[in-house]
Image (cartoon, rainbow, N blue to C red):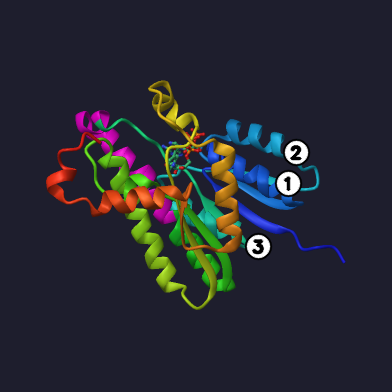
Amino acid sequence: MEEERRRIVIVGATSAIAEHCARLWARQGPVDLVLVGRDAERLKRLASDLEVRSSDSSIRIVPIDFLNSEAISSTVEEIAKTPIDIVLIAHGMLPSQDACQEDLLTCREALEVNGISPALFAEAFAGAMDENREGTIALIGSVAGDRGRKSNYAYGSAKAMIEHYAQGLQHRFFGTKIKVVFIKPGPTDTPMTARLKAEGVSLTPVVDAARRIVDAIDKGRRTVYVPCYWSVIMRALRCLPGFIFYRLNI
Ligand SMILES: NC(=O)c1ccc[n+]([C@@H]2O[C@H](COP(=O)([O-])OP(=O)(O)OC[C@H]3O[C@@H](n4cnc5c(N)ncnc54)[C@H](OP(=O)(O)O)[C@@H]3O)[C@@H](O)[C@H]2O)c1
């Protein structure tokens, strides 16, 4: 008997982390992938690459405006007409904190793209999975959401918001077959961190991060740091008393 194929939706599919997750899922066996992104041309290129890697998989692209709640609602409703096994919500942007302080439009975009938009996608997919009574919703947050810091609090506060949202969904679906996985990567080698790389910051290879993310999603883990040692670092940072923390240049 032919094994049932998983149906996986990736929102922000053109992100480097998401692309590597898609490759890993495609490598596990034929899969039905729905790639959601803002740029149709980039989505087409990604789909062609995945088709070469996994000719038995079916791949569909869905371009959408990520900040339009009506578009999110109708797009998710349409995608969810066929039951979904996994949705990975991966989009994000990292403007410099200085840029957010100097220009409120940039600050607003950082808050909306990293916070409101992923939360709306999660809510829409949660509604669809609630009807089907199973599935996994995974959201990519960041270690930056663990404590407000002067170097990245616009980005970090949006990531903290989606962590809170994910916790609420985890509570809502406790005891059901719906799993909500929240992923907190540390600095990872992708286009988003090109600036950090140029400054010599040590970055996790994106393939390693994707491997851990796919594993956490497949296991339905609740909260995962990527790599795991970030949980120790961030616990220490969260515990630092203010009289030490505020003196740090981080
Ligand atoms: N890299 C890291 O060190 C790191 C660390 C912690 C958390 N994360 C998180 O991991 C996720 C994936 O990041 P990545 O490192 O793979 O980044 P990436 O390769 O730079 O990808 C960013 C993704 O977000 C999309 N995006 C950017 N601005 C957007 C907007 N205004 N509207 C809609 N989509 C937008 C991009 O779409 P286009 O392709 O169309 O530009 C792309 O799909 C993000 O949520 C990020 O915050 C990354």
In-front residue for pair 156/55: 156
Q: Does label 1 or label 3 sit earlier along the sequence?
A: 1
- Report the residue that reaches farthest toward the top: 198
The Cα atoms of the two marked residues, 1 and 3, are separated by: 23 Å
Q: Does label 3 or label 2 sit earlier along the sequence?
A: 2
Image-based side of 136 in relation to 25, left or right? left
Where is residue 86 shown, x and y percent of the image? 59, 58
The Cα atoms of the two marked residues, 3 and 2, are separated by: 24 Å
What is the chief secondary structure element of the magenta stretch? helix
Q: Which residue is mark 2?
A: 53
In-front residue for pair 246/88: 246
Snapshot quadrant of residue 135 = bottom right
In-front residue for pair 229/167: 229
Q: Are marks 3 and 2 in contact (CB under 8 Å)?
A: no
Of the residues tagged 1 and 3, which is closer to the observer?
Answer: 1
Task: Kindly identify which numbered label has been placed on residue 27.
Answer: 1
The type of residue carrying mark 2 is: Arg
Report if residue 107 lies within the magenta region: yes
Of the residues tagged 3 and 2, which is closer to the observer?
Answer: 2
Q: Are marks 2 and 1 in contact (CB under 8 Å)?
A: yes
The type of residue carrying mark 1 is: Arg
Where is residue 61 shown, x and y percent of the image? 63, 43
Image-based side of 214 in relation to 247, left or right? right
Image-based side of 125 in relation to 84, left or right? left
Instruction: Name the secondary structure under disc 2.
Output: helix
Q: Which residue is mark 3?
A: 82
46 over 218 or under it: above or below: above
In the image, what residue occupies the spot 70% across and 45% down? 59
Where is residue 36 shown, x and y percent of the image? 56, 45
The type of residue carrying mark 3 is: Thr
- Residue 58 appears in the figure: no
In the image, what residue occupies the spot 20% across and 32% down? 101
